[in-house]
Amino acid sequence: MRMYDLIRKKRDGETLTKEEIEFIIRGYTDESIPDYQMAALAMAIYFRGMDPRETADLTLAMAASGDMVNLSAVEGVKVDKHSTGGVGDTTTLVLAPLVAAAGVPVAKMSGRGLGHTGGTIDKLESIPGFSVELTEEQFVNHVNMIKIALIGQTGDIAPADKKLYALRDVTATVDTIPLIASSIMSKKLAAGADAIVLDVKTGEGAFMKTQEGSFSLAKAMVDIGNQLGRKTVAVISDMNQPLGYAVGNALEVKEAIETLKGAGPADLEELCLELGSQMLILAGKTPTADEAKNLLKELIHAGAGLETFKRFVEAQGGDPTVIDNPDLLPKAQMQVSFLAEEDGFVSYIDAEKVGTSAMMLGAGRERKDSVIDLAVGIVLNKKVGDPVKKGEALAVLHVNNQSRLEEVKALLREAFEISPTPVPKPLLVCGIVTGEKIDRF
């Protein structure tokens, strides 16, 4: 086989065989295929696409390029959840302990964030002492004992995807469904779950800005998972405005604790119940979404999700008293109100601009080597549809470094739009994609 012939084959719109795809990924991983040839193939895929079988073969080849986590020692059906990313996306911190409290094992591998705020690990590390440095034996034991554990993603998980993504990022070939879907799913397959629930965001604060694109991506990923023997479901959720109220690491942990107490934002709880119900169904815990949601609501009401979160934090070295007293989390030195300049109703909040504002305060990473300030961020006081008076706080900025404060305020002025007339609250869950059908709400 020659890479030249395979580039030409895809350029001409033909399909690649499983063996050819494995040859490409193996050669790119061991560097016998150079970047310039892989870039040419990526551009050919961008224009010619890949069919579902090719995409599944690419996914499996990238997953097999490094370590494949073996979770066979974990009892029960292991269900993983993946979000395509958003602003204030705190679902894992609520979902994982809640689903674990229902008796479904959550063996989670998470990453650090590059963008608006930290990733799940960064958020949890705002709890004093919390660590993701577990041995494989500790990881399995924790999941079997308390149904939940979380470790960091190693460099040996899907290394071909890591190389290919870096190349796509500089060759204008990121934005193509087969390569996006295979990138996400290769890491999910390598992480060892039996079933996968995908939270595919749509809107201004999401990677996919349109519902059409989000449904297409969801369908591609669901098809990959099911073809490769993993029961997979996708939930399409709105990310035109931030999820919940908090955007920032310690601030989001506090909001997650409030949600597990039954006192969190309505939209965050709604999405967690939707995603959690799909996880319970895939695990065989409940037959219907309504029964699953009722069980999860009971676990919130009884405090079981909160208790599981506390046990999880303590098992991984964190201070469990933080769960009872979130004021022990890192706090910013200053709180600055961002005020409305007119009366009316909030008609639009640009999630991406709010996220960028939080990053400028220090809550996220602008570069890989940026140091996150776990205490800072933004807490919204208003969401789309809410009434507001001139001089009332639309948000509160939690600030340690004032050097970019005026720049942040200017960006937030662009993020909020006020209407003189009432505005309906947007639909949060836009649809569900399974192997059998696509439901649009």
Image (cartoon, rainbow, N blue to C red):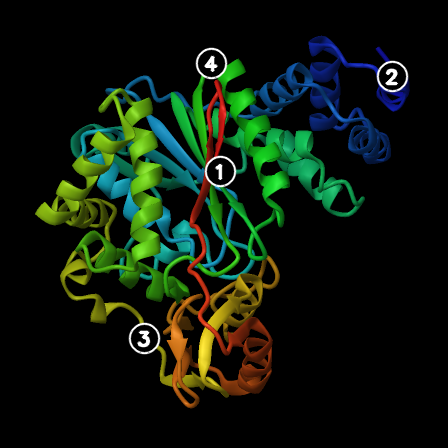
At label 1, the amino acid type is Thr
Query: Please, is residue 31 above or below residue 261 in the view?
Result: above
Between discs 4 and 3, the one toward the N terminus? 4
Look at the numbered discs 2 and 1 and tell me whether their residues touch, using CB distance below 8 Å: no
Name which of mark 3 and mark 1 comes first in the sequence. 1
Residue 131 located left or right of residue 209 = left
Please name which of the two marks, 3 or 1, marks the residue nearer to the observer.
Answer: 3
Q: Residue 265: horizontal and vertical position, in percent?
A: 30, 60
On the image, numbered disc 1 is attached to which residue? 154
User: Which numbered disc, 2 or 3, marks the residue that appears first in the sequence?
Assistant: 2
How crowded pointer 1 is (Cα within 10 Å; few <14, some 14-19, many 20+) is rated as few
Q: In the image, is residue 335 above or below residue 355?
A: below
* Numbered mark located on residue 9 in the image: 2
Residue at (50%, 78%) from the top-left corner?
420
Give the image location of residue 18, x and y in percent. Answer: 69, 10
Is 58 situated above or below 256?
above
Of marks 2 and 1, which one's residue comes earlier in the chain?
2
Question: Dot 4 surroundings within 10 Å: few (below 14), some, or many (20 or more)?
Answer: few
Asked which quadrant contains residue 49, the reply is top right
SS category of the residue bearing label 4: loop
- Depth check, mark 2 against mark 3: the one in front is 2
Residue at the spot of label 3 = 331
The amino acid type found where label 3 is placed reads: Lys
What residue is shown with label 4? 229
Callouts 2 and 3 close, C-beta under 8 Å? no
Cα separation between marks 2 and 4: 29 Å
Q: Quadrant of the N terminus?
A: top right
Name which residue lies at 23% across and 41% down.
Answer: 98
